Structure formats: structure tokens, C-alpha cells
Image (cartoon, rainbow, N blue to C red):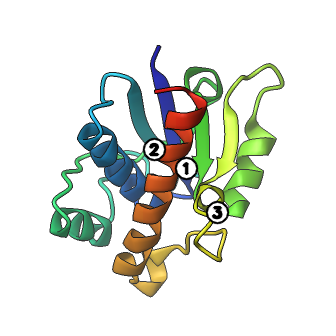
Amino acid sequence: MTIRVLFVCLGNICRSPMAEGVFRHLVEQAGLADQIEVDSAGTSDWHVGEPAHEGTRYVLEKHGIAYDGRSRQVTRQDFYDFDYLVAMDSSNLVALRQMRPLDAHAKLALFLEFADEINMRDVPDPYYSGRFEHVYGLVEQGAQALLGYIREHEEL
């Protein structure tokens, strides 16, 4: 059985691709790449087809994480294809709840809810602030916590 995880932010060029890259890296390090698939998407169509923001690519590369994905928008099918749709902030979680088909099985969650040691719930968008390294730190902690949660709850 494969567990599929989709990280979601607004434009799919900063936070969600960073989470995708970091989480995939952790999954590979844990030897679970054959059991956990990872992707990312945005609730908007503003950047469809574009590479991740240069700040995201830079910080991932700096930390030894390869990433070459392209932005895409969340689709109705994602709610059926993925087990977890993980929003990077509460506004995108609201958007996902509004988009979710009634019969979809995907679990919707806020990314930082898995990281009890972090006293914030929304990953700030570095698009305007440029604080990509700060966001990376939050994403790394959140990704480790999410992986621990999935390993425990999915018995991996």
C-alpha cells in the first residue's frame, strides 16, 4: 500500500514545493520511498507550469535537496488520489475544505499541526518577505513531525 501526500499552498512556488522537497528527502532517507509518494500543488492557478521560486530552489539546494518540479493547481481528482492533503496555512486549508468533494477520502490537515514544538500554525509565505531560510526551518520540523505521524498511523 502506498501513502500519497500532497502539500498545498497558494501558488505552489514557495512553501508547498519546499515541503515536497524536504519531505521527499526525509522519506528517501528513511527508506520509505516505495511506500510514500509526495507531490505539491496550489489552490490558485497563478503560477501553473512555472518552476519553484528561486528562493525556494536556492534554500533547498543549499541543504542538499534536489527539486525540479513545476507548479500545478489542485484538482478535484487530488482529493481521491491522495491520502493526505496538507495545507501550509489556514487560508489554504479553508480553500481545500471548500473544494473537497463530499465522497472524497483524503485527510485534510494543517502542516504545522503535526509539529507540537512550534508555536505557530501557519507557515508564513516568503514570497514577499524573502525569509526562505526561516520557512525552511519550519518546513523541516513540520516534515519530520508529519513523517513520524504517518509512520505511526499508517504503520510503516
Label whose residue precedes the other's in the sequence (2 or 3):
2
Q: CA distance from mark 2 to mark 3?
A: 14 Å
Element type at mark 3: loop
Which residue does the numbered mark 3 point to in the structure image? 89
The answer to whether residue 130 is above or below residue 33 is below
Q: Are marks 3 and 1 in contact (CB under 8 Å)?
A: no
Question: Which disc number belongs to residue 8?
Answer: 1
Label whose residue precedes the other's in the sequence (1 or 2):
1
Where residue 30 appears, as percent x and y from the top left, is 30, 39
Q: CA distance from mark 3 to mark 1?
A: 9 Å
For the point 46% across and 44% down, the residue is 147
Q: Residues within 10 Å of mark 2 (few under 14, many from 20)?
A: many
For the point 83% across and 25% down, the residue is 102
Relative depth, front residue between 128 and 131: 131
Where residue 41 appears, as percent x and y from the top left, is 49, 45
Q: Which residue type does callout 3 highlight?
A: Asp
Q: Are marks 1 and 2 in contact (CB under 8 Å)?
A: yes
Q: Residues within 10 Å of mark 3 (few under 14, many from 20)?
A: many
Which residue does the numbered mark 2 point to in the structure image? 40
Q: Is residue 3 left or right of residue 121?
A: left
For residue 11, say whether it is visible: yes
- Single out the residue that lies furthest toward the right: 102
